[in-house]
Each structure stands twice: as C-alpha cells, then as structure tokens.
C-alpha cells in the first residue's frame, strides 16, 4: 500500500516553536515531534516565500526553476510540470490543495486534481477543509498540501497566554517593551497555527490512516523580524522540519544532520515510487532514518535575488562556517525587505536602516552562532575563505546561476524595484 502524503506548511515561522526549545505555546507540534522525527539543522533554499516553496516543491534551486522573486509580483516557474503535484499525479496520486501555495497565480498550473474551497487562507478556515478531506473516502493514495497564512504578519491581538511581560524576542532583536509586545503577536499567531495542525492530525487519527500517512510539517523561512526573513543568516534560512510516518519517521527521534528542504522531493519520490525528471539537487532522507548514513551533505546553499527590491545574494553553509556573497553594492539596508511591525519601527528609529551591508561575509557559526563577527579579513581564516569561495563558485557553475552572467533582470511587468537599471 502506497502511503498518503500530507504536507503542512506555514508562513514565516523559522524554528520558533516549542519542539525547537522556544517558549511558544505549540503543544500539538510538540506531540507531533515526540511521535516523529525532528531535524534540528534544516535549511530552506531561500529566505523569501515563493522561491523557498518553489525549491522545496521542485527539488531544485530557485534560480534553476525561474522563481527568483514572489509569484504575486510577476515571477513564475519556467516549467510547472516539475512541481511535486504533477509528479505525484503522474504516479497515480490524487493531488489536493487546501489553502495557500504561493508558487503560481493559478494553482491549476501545479498539478492539483482539486483545490478545496476555503473562505480565506487563515488557519481557522483552511484546517476544517483539510480535515474534512482527510475524513472522506479515498480510493487511491492522496497528496494533500495544506498551506496556512499563519505566522505571517499582521499578527492577531495577543491573548492572555501571550503576556508580553514574560516573552523574549527573537535572538537578533533587542529586548524592549516594544519588541516583546511584537513577539506576543507572533505567539498568538503560532497558537492558531498549532491548533490548525492539531485539527488535521486528529482527522488522520480518526480516519485510521496514521500508519500509512507521511506527514511533513515545515515552513518557508525565518520570522518576519529584522535580520531574519529576507536574509541569508541562519535566522533567515533556518526552518523547522518535522516528519511522521512511513520510512522510519517515528519514535521521537532528533536528527542533527545538515539537511535542506530540497531533500524532501527525493524523499517523497522514494517513498511513493514516483519518478521525477533528472536534476534533483537534494538527497533522500531515508538513509538517515535507516542508519546507513549519519550525514547527507557537507554543505547546503541558499539564495536571494528579488523580494520587493533587487538584492542578489548567495550563501554556502557547512557544519562550521557560513559564507555570504552580495552581488549588488549597498550602503544601507533595503527596509522594504523587513515586514512592517513594532520591532522594525523600534530599530529603524534608532538608525538600524542606515547600516552598510558588507559585500562578503564569513562566520564561524560554531563559535559565533549569531553571525555577528565577519572573519573575511582575518588572516587566520584565509584558507577557509578560499575554500568557501571555491564552494560557492562551483555551485553557481553547476547550477548555471544567472548571476554568473551579470545582473539578473526581472520578468517584463514584474512589480519590483530595481527591475530597470538595478537602482535602489
């Protein structure tokens, strides 16, 4: 019996949920983690929404599939048939979408047999629709993609459980009354997400299909706070990734292997028997579960090209080091790339937006986990700089990164700054 696949995705959550040690009230995610597998060092391929999701759902880097910016701003997949929906549909799966997908303006392009009607992409509307589908009769294996708006801004009003007096803002953000209140809003949004996940998981249990259903729970990138989302720091590309079901994803296992969301596509294909086209960049996670391998990658990569503005950057991260290269000189932050909120307002009022952006950065993420000390000019790290530059160049050549040929223009009609002349 081929397993059902349920892919639960949230917006802008990073790793700020209870199973990763943060004091955010997400009891259903905690229960899910204790029943499945938690990947502590999982990374997305981009710190922005559509590129990250496109990479996960094609198994290729955003620049390889045309998703160099946001789908609602004019970017699209070069070949929608590379999407997991089409691949599983061809393998005999019924493919269904509930809620947000953020890869195509028209979800019908992506290979869904059915798009469930929902009033909005809020968790309160999406979860019941997904749960009702799970509870129905299924004559063939299904792939159900469930996308929640949460934890994207704007955040809901905090409740009694989200008392800002006793909350700590994310690590890149200073501790102040304003930022604590901002974190209270995130906490309220995360609770809504957690409740929705619980509804879907309850439906799986009640339908009696838990043993035959692989559930994947992840997010697109880091929190929508300053120095997180839309950056290539670990706080921008570090994501929760939890899985439960066939393939050995059981037992409350915690994995410290360095993995990328691009590994999910080959994992799903191996479990379902689906045959993808050539060119997948990730590796199946199953060897980690079977114990035949302890590691999959000696490095992972991520990229940023367009968001609201043009900010081309690439990075390579190993167990010990992170190297980031910018391909556009800036003497300031692009403030539009940080979502509006109390934390952004607090920092920009104190000069945060006027800080110059360094063109190249090397961090020892073991001794400097907050990526605060650029070691690029440190003579003691010259060999590491040479190695990381070589890794970056090799990856860009292997994947035919368009930045190798100069500035990358946006598609005609795209709603972005920097599309003409690459100006700020």
Image (cartoon, rainbow, N blue to C red):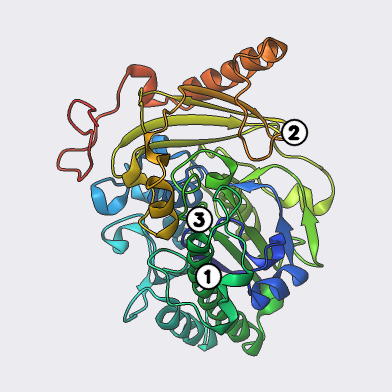
Residue 221 is left or right of residue 212, and the answer is: left
Which element carries disc 3, helix, strand or loop? loop
Q: Residues within 10 Å of mark 1 (few under 14, many from 20)?
A: many
Residue nearer the viewer, 219 or 110? 219
Q: Nearer the viewer, mark 3 or mark 1?
A: 1
The quarter of the image holding the N terminus is bottom right
Residue 118 is tagged as none
Identity of the residue drawn at 39% across and 59% down: 341
Q: Which circle's residue, 2 or 3, is located before the other in the chain?
A: 3
Q: Which circle's residue, 2 or 1, is located before the other in the chain?
A: 1
Q: Where does label 2 land, which residue? A: 367
Q: Which circle's residue, 3 or 1, is located before the other in the chain?
A: 1
Identify the image quadrant of residue 330.
Answer: top left
Residue 184 is tagged as 1
Most distant residue in the left direction: 413
Find residue 301 and report its horizontal and vertical position in percent. 56, 34
Identity of the residue drawn at 71% across and 65% down: 19
Q: Where does label 3 land, which residue? A: 223
Q: Residues within 10 Å of mark 2 (few under 14, many from 20)?
A: few
Residue nearer the viewer, 141 or 22? 22
Find residue 372 and report its horizontal and vertical position in percent. 61, 34
Which element carries disc 1, helix, strand or loop? helix
């Amino acid at each position: 019996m081929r397993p059902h696949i349920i892919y639960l995705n949230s917006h802008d959550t990073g790793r700020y949920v209870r199973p990763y040690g943060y004091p955010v009230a997400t009891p259903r995610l905690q229960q899910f983690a204790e029943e499945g597998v938690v990947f502590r060092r999982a990374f997305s391929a981009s710190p922005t929404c559509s590129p990250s999701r496109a990479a996960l759902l094609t198994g290729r880097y955003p620049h390889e599939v045309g998703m160099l910016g946001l789908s609602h701003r004019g970017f699209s997949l070069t070949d929608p048939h590379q999407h997991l929906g089409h691949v599983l549909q061809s393998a005999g799966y019924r493919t269904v979408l509930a809620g947000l997908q953020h890869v195509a303006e028209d979800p019908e392009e992506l290979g869904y047999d059915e798009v469930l009607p929902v009033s909005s992409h809020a968790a309160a509307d999406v979860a019941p629709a997904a749960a009702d589908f799970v509870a129905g009769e299924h004559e063939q294996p299904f792939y159900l993609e469930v996308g929640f708006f949460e934890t994207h801004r704007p955040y809901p009003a905090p409740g009694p459980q989200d008392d800002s007096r006793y909350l700590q803002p994310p690590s890149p953000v200073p501790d102040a009354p304003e930022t604590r209140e901002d974190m209270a809003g995130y906490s309220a949004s995360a609770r809504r997400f957690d409740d929705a996940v619980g509804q879907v998981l309850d439906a799986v249990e009640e339908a009696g299909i838990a043993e035959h259903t692989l559930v994947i729970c992840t997010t697109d990138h880091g929190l929508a706070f300053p120095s997180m989302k839309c950056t290539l720091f670990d706080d921008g590309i570090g994501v929760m990734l939890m899985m439960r079901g066939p393939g050995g994803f059981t037992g409350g296992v915690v994995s410290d292997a360095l993995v990328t969301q691009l590994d999910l596509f080959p994992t799903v294909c191996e479990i379902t028997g689906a045959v993808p086209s050539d060119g997948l960049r990730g590796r199946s996670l199953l060897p980690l579960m079977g114990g035949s391998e302890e590691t999959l990658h000696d490095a992972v990569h991520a990229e940023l090209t367009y968001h609201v503005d043009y900010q081309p950057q690439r990075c390579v991260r190993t167990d010990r080091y992170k190297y980031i290269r910018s391909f556009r000189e800036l003497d300031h932050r692009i403030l539009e790339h940080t979502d509006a909120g109390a934390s952004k307002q607090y920092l920009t009022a104190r000069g945060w937006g006027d800080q110059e952006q360094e063109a190249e950065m090397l961090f020892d993420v073991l001794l400097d986990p907050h990526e605060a000390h650029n070691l690029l000019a440190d003579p003691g790290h010259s060999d590491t700089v040479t190695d990381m530059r070589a890794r970056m160049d090799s990856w860009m050549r292997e994947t035919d990164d368009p930045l190798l040929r100069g500035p990358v223009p946006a598609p005609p009609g795209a709603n972005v700054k920097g599309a003409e002349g690459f100006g700020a």
